[in-house]
Image (cartoon, rainbow, N blue to C red):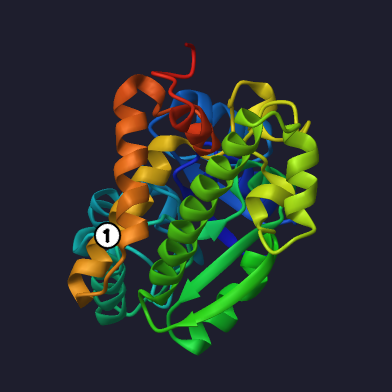
Amino acid sequence: MSNIAFIGLGNMGGPMAANLIKKGHHVTGFDLSETALKALASAGGQIAVSALAAAATADVVISMLPSGKHVAELYSEDFITHLQPNTLLIDSSTIDAVTARSVAALASSKGCRMIDAPVSGGTGGAQAGTLTFIVGGKQEDYEKARPILKCMGQNIFHAGASGAGQVAKICNNMLLAIHMIGTSEAINLGVKHGLDPKILSEIMQKSSGKNWSLEVYNPYPGVMDNAPASRAYSGGFAVDLMAKDLGLAAEAGLDTKTSTPLGNTALNLYRIWSEAGNGKVDFSSIIQFLNGKGNIEN
């Protein structure tokens, strides 16, 4: 079993760290939140006073942080030089590919291994240990990380070199936003014409409009008991996080002069919805925006 440092113990990182503990790994964690640290201790983990204190003697360092800025600040030259030689660094944050490649190059120059391994599956997947990991990095580093990732997820993909995991993740989330908006438009149109949203959703699931949003994450309240739409859009994947990922996709498109008109439209819609005060609710709530709601409480 490995000696693992886990940096960033929020809604995703906390359950991921707990699953590592359940699998027998020794986990020392750090987070700015006292509540998050107490949750780790309750799960059987150790608490550190700083990120460096958690990582200094670790075999593996895993991070789950809000943005590329935070990742770059964590994996500074000073931080990496204090790690043991050959330490495996796994960043599961969703950030821009440029930052992912930059910190991986720095880690390599200091004798450490590093992969970018953003996740898909949301908080439910983090708690259940069923996440999908999308990895960018060297093949040998991917193979070394795979047993660790399997403790937290079910599907592990090697997308390519450093940064490839981030690119694949933002491509996936751009598509997710687009088909959620399309699904919402279609259901709204049917309901306006008197159709039952549940029956319409079933028809589309069995027809050419079938997609993930219809199958497991229906945006219309009451259609699917376990979906955020049926609990006032609480939990799940926040509007602000979707807007962040769509912003990363837009930047990636500009970097390569790739046209992403639907992705850019989705970004604008989610930003407007966030600015109306809905940044913390689930992204499937976009159906309420398309329905003319000013915010989720109206």
Q: Position of residue 266 (x, y in %)?
A: 37, 49
User: Position of 174 compared to 80: left or right?
Assistant: right
Q: Position of residue 285 (x, y in %)?
A: 52, 31
Quadrant into which the N terminus falls: bottom right
Q: Is residue 95 visible?
A: no
For residue 123, what is the image quadrant?
A: top right
Most extreme residue toward the front, as rendered? 193
Q: Position of residue 173 (x, y in %)?
A: 47, 57
Q: Is residue 217 visible?
A: yes
Which residue is drawn at the image coordinates 53% and 69% (left, top)? 134
User: Position of 75 compared to 238: left or right?
Assistant: left
Which residue is drawn at the image coordinates 76% and 31% (left, top)? 196
Q: Nearer the viewer, residue 39 or 183?
A: 183
Q: Nearer the viewer, residue 157 or 51?
A: 157
Which residue is drawn at the image coordinates 24% and 57% (left, top)? 72
Secondary structure at numbered mark 1: helix
Q: Position of residue 88 (x, y in %)?
A: 46, 71
Q: Nearer the viewer, residue 131 or 108?
A: 131
Q: Nearer the viewer, residue 228 or 264?
A: 264
How crowded pointer 1 is (Cα within 10 Å; few <14, some 14-19, many 20+) is rated as many
For residue 138, what is the image quadrant?
A: bottom left
**Image height of 138 relative to 118, above or below:** below
